[in-house]
Image: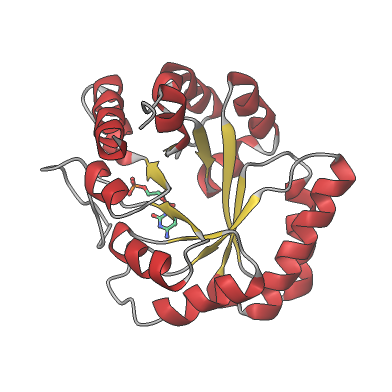
Amino acid sequence: MAKVTDVDVRSHLALGLDFDDPIVALDRAFALREWFGVAKVGHELYAAAGPSIIAQLRDIGYGVFLDAKLHDIPNTVGSAARVLARYGLAYLNFHTSGGLEMLLAGIEGAREGAAQAGVAVPKLLGVTVLTSDSDTSAFARRLDLASESGCDGVVCSALEVERVKVAHPGLITMVPGIRLAGSDNNDQARVATPFDAIRNGADVLVIVRTVHHAVDPAAAAAQVFDEVASALD
Ligand code: C5P
């Protein structure tokens, strides 16, 4: 089998930049570039920095995941997705709890926006159940909605990846709630180590506090990277 390259490993790792200051976020993005191929911009950073942060992260070499978790009436989600997709994103997401019509409108909007700007259509992901929620009763229905609407993948915990791959093998799984063994779960209810998540079949791991709250963020990033590399081997 071909050797797993650093680029392969990085493509499985999204660095969440949950900061309220774009300078701090960009600093971190520069410092940890060696270990991550995707940068995740969530509500906090997007609110602080605005859309210009997307091009700045792309210039450093990241694909950008805009964790917008859009959820509104179909027309509004379609319009927002159209605007956001123009910025050139690798991934964009919607709450599947918004329903089929909303997801369809969001996907159509994203495709239109990307075409208008001449950029690639982002991979479109449906958030199933937040990893902070221990009640996963809505998971199966939301997974089916993501598939039925034409989403490229879902956001789910490592504990549900296998169910995704069995029911809808073509869907990408973006997986938050990743912790190194022995570290604090914080507010996350459904967590796994980087190694276990990849071995379960997760495609991209979202890493936030595991790295940023570490005494030595670079060392934590390297440890996450090594676990993913060995799980892929
Ligand atoms: O620090 P931690 O690794 O728990 O961060 C998880 C990140 O993933 C946060 O940025 C959060 O907004 C995001 N997220 C999540 N659960 C989802 C979707 C996104 O925790 N279902």
Q: Is 138 drawn above or below residue 67 in the view shown?
A: below
Horizontally, is 212 left or right of 38 in the view?
A: left
Residue at 27%, 42% (x, y): give it.
194
Splitting the image into 4 quarters, where does residue 15 fall? Answer: top left
Left/right of residue 158 with respect to residue 146 in the rendered view: left
Task: Please identify the residue farthest to the front as the structure is shown.
Answer: 1
The residue furthest right is 116
Q: Is residue 67 above or below residue 211?
A: below
Instruction: Judge from the rendering whether residue 168 lies leftward or rightward of residue 91; answer left or right.
Output: left
The residue lying toward the viewer, choosing from 75 and 173, is 173
Residue 133 % position (x, y): 32, 69
**Position of residue 207 measured from the top left corner of the image (x, y, whole percent):** 36, 40
Front-most of residues 87 and 108: 108
**Can you say whether 16 is above or below 139 in the image?**
above
Return the x and y of residue 167 as percentages of the image width and height.
44, 73
Q: Position of residue 193 (x, y in %)?
A: 22, 46
- Determine the residue positioned at 25% across, 33% down: 230
Give above or below for 38 relative to 179.
above
Q: Is residue 199 left or right of residue 161?
A: left
* Residue at point 33%, 64% (across, down): 162
The residue shown at (44%, 31%) is: 8
| The furthest residue to the left | 182
- Residue 93 seen in render: yes
The quarter of the picture where the N terminus appears is top left
Q: Nearer the viewer, residue 28 or 91?
A: 91
